[in-house]
């Protein structure tokens, strides 16, 4: 400890005291958030506020680079930043306590502001951040003087105190997590009894799954279904407390409980969901058999008034979606879904209820944890993503994806199975065409499908000569329109262009 300046604590001690005090503060806040709500924990509140303010290009880059792990990456980076900030505060507090106090006050103010401006926040949402800041100050006040005294005995005292602080931080964090875990609705989900559908889906046509090894299965198992949402903590909505409010431009506003929803005639439908952020060839698409009440039926019961052009839906965590009313009412299987592939909705996929509207990207159709439907006008209510410049009418673009052979695969010369899935929800896929090295387009074999709302498997045996080969695919939708080859980014209306794969043939 060469940098000891006689009276004050060493730099190392300052850094350590800052880190420990930060951990104590975050632990205390975590514990308090267990009683308030998880969204009020400092890093979750700041992270959520940050996500909402992140520019489109950065969000895209994050989704592209980290995929479904974007949330873990965000929280991990925030924890790292918090650790550095806490250590620096400790260092500053050692020589300039007033400056350190001012910096902590600024951080606290930012945390409180974030917590109070999260969707559905109340005044108590400020409590975890404030308690956390107070705990951090108390910890720093205890640790720094012990670190300042120097000498062997006092070093032991500092280590003891530090160990105590670390234990306190870990203990309160774990206790907070455990208490928050009591909100988990996993049990309520397991106890949910699904009624049989009033209108079951026909069994899948034979051969809907071509069973080509390595090809994306026709039905995506729930555990493999892509997940895209803005929720840093998965909303836990107890079906006992759940109600759906239907209001706005309607003659008879409704409030529906979960039990009432289950008593409605339920429809079963195979529908492929796609995210507008999906790049050409990307993985953000999945197909499931959904069970739910007719959304049009609910709206008709409420009595839609003239002049309305959208259904503005809201989730339990304040996310909003605007769905073109015409699409909901035109007879397609627009659902208030309660189940996915025979099981109650998995909690990350919207338990107890979500919207599913075939043909539209998820950001304008697939509200998870839905609690509120307002019949309104695009001119009056702007939703989360459309307010950020994404297209109002997010019709899914026609897309063929090559799953086999894998990119940069090495394959033996001769006949090679080229296979994938293609989608053009609600228009249907009429054909998939494949070409090699810019040669003539050849028509692939299509698997049968139950309806026009799902993706469709396709396969074509191609004769590949040795060398580097570039395989391209495109789809033709049910209206006869050929998928455009023009490359476009996902923003603002979905990516376009032909998917291609390069392989080495030996
Ligand atoms: N509450 C809520 N619902 C949401 C979202 C969200 O961020 N919050 N994201 C939407 C988007 S952009 C998509 S693509 C789908 C994804 O549904 P999944 O996660 O079940 O695949 O959910 C939609 N519903
Ligand atoms: Mo999405």
Image: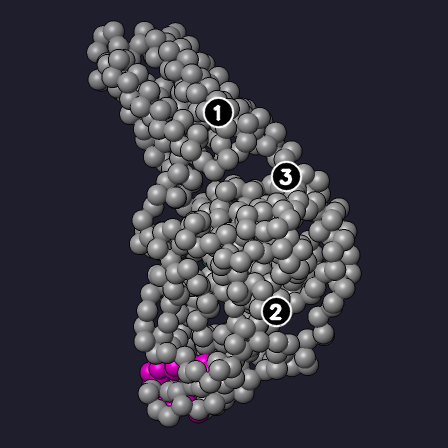
Query: What residue lies at 55% left-to-right and 48% top-to-bottom?
Result: 248
Disc 1, disc 3: CB below 8 Å?
Answer: no
Question: Closer to the observer: label 1 or label 3?
Answer: 1
Q: Earlier in the sequence, mark 2 or mark 3?
A: 3
* Residue that carries the numbered disc 2 in the rendered image: 331
Asked if residue 499 can be seen in this view, the reply is: yes
Question: Closer to the observer: label 2 or label 3?
Answer: 2
**Would residue 96 appear left or right of 209 to someone viewing this image?**
left
Residue 36 figure quarter:
top right
Query: What residue lies at 38% left-to-right and 58% top-to-bottom?
Result: 390
* Residue that carries the numbered disc 3 in the rendered image: 184
Magenta part of the chain: 463-476
Nearer to us in this view, 226 or 461:
226
| Mark 3: C-beta under 8 Å from nearest atom of ligand 1 | no
* Residue that carries the numbered disc 1 in the rendered image: 123
Query: What residue lies at 53% left-to-right and 78% top-to-bottom?
Result: 428
Disc 2, disc 1: CB below 8 Å?
Answer: no
Nearer to us in this view, 319 or 486:
319
Count residues near mark 1 (Cα–Cα under 10 Å), then give few for <14, some for 14-19, many for 20+: few
Tell me how far mark 2 sits from mark 3, CA to CA: 36 Å
Q: Which mark is residue 240?
A: none
Q: Earlier in the sequence, mark 2 or mark 1?
A: 1
What count of labels does the image hold? Answer: 3
Q: Earlier in the sequence, mark 1 or mark 3?
A: 1
Percent coordinates x, y for residue 22 in the rendering: 40, 24
Query: What residue lies at 74% left-to-right and 49% top-to-bottom?
Result: 260
Establish if 197 lies above or below 71: below
Question: Closer to the observer: label 2 or label 1?
Answer: 2
Task: Kindly state the secondary structure of the residue where label 2 is placed.
Answer: loop
Percent coordinates x, y for residue 468 in the rendering: 33, 83
Percent coordinates x, y for residue 374 in the rendering: 54, 49
């Amino acid at each position: 400890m060469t940098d000891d300046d006689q009276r004050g604590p060493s730099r190392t001690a300052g850094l350590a005291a800052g880190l420990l005090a930060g951990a104590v503060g975050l632990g205390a806040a975590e514990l308090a958030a267990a009683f308030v709500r998880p969204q009020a924990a400092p890093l979750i509140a700041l992270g959520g506020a940050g996500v909402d303010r992140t520019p489109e290009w950065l969000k895209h880059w994050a989704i592209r680079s980290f995929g479904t792990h974007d949330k873990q990456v965000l929280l991990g980076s925030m924890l790292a930043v918090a650790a550095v900030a806490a250590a620096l505060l400790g260092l500053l507090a050692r020589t300039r306590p007033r400056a350190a106090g001012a910096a902590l006050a600024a951080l606290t103010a930012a945390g409180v502001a974030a917590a109070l401006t999260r969707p559905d926040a109340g005044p108590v949402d400020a409590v975890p951040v404030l308690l956390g800041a107070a705990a951090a100050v108390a910890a720093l006040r205890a640790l720094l003087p012990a670190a300042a005294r120097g000498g062997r005995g006092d070093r032991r005292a500092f280590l003891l105190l530090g160990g105590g602080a670390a234990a306190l931080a870990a203990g309160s964090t774990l206790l907070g997590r455990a208490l928050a875990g009591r909100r988990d609705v996993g049990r309520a989900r397991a106890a949910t009894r699904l009624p049989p559908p009033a209108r079951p889906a026909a069994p899948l046509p034979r051969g809907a799954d071509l069973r080509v090894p390595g090809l994306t299965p026709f039905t995506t198992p729930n555990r493999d279904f892509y997940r895209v949402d803005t929720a840093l903590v998965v909303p836990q909505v107890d079906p006992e407390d759940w109600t759906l409010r239907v209001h706005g431009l309607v003659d008879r506003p409704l409030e529906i409980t979960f039990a009432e929803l289950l008593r409605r005639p339920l429809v079963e439908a195979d529908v492929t969901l796609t995210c507008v952020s999906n790049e050409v060839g990307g993985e953000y698409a999945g197909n499931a058999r959904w069970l739910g009440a007719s959304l049009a039926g609910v709206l008709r019961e409420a009595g839609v008034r003239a002049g309305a052009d959208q259904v503005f839906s809201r989730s339990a965590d304040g996310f909003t979606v605007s769905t073109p009313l015409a699409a909901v009412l035109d007879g397609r299987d627009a659902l208030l879904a309660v189940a996915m592939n025979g099981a109650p909705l998995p909690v990350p996929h919207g338990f107890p209820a979500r919207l599913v509207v075939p043909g539209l990207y998820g950001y304008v159709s697939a509200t998870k944890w839905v609690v509120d439907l307002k019949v309104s006008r695009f001119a009056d209510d702007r939703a989360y993503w459309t307010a950020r410049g994404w297209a109002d009418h997010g019709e899914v673009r026609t897309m063929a994806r090559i799953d086999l052979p894998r990119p940069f695969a090495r394959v033996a010369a001769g006949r090679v199975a080229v296979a994938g899935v293609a989608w053009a929800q609600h228009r249907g896929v009429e054909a998939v065409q494949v070409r090699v090295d810019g040669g003539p387009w050849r028509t692939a074999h299509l698997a049968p499908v139950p309806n026009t709302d799902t993706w469709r498997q396709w396969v074509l045996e191609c004769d590949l000569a040795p060398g580097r080969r570039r395989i391209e695919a495109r789809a033709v939708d049910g209206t006869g329109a050929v998928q455009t080859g023009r490359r476009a980014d996902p923003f603002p209306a979905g990516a376009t262009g032909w998917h291609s794969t390069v392989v080495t043939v030996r």
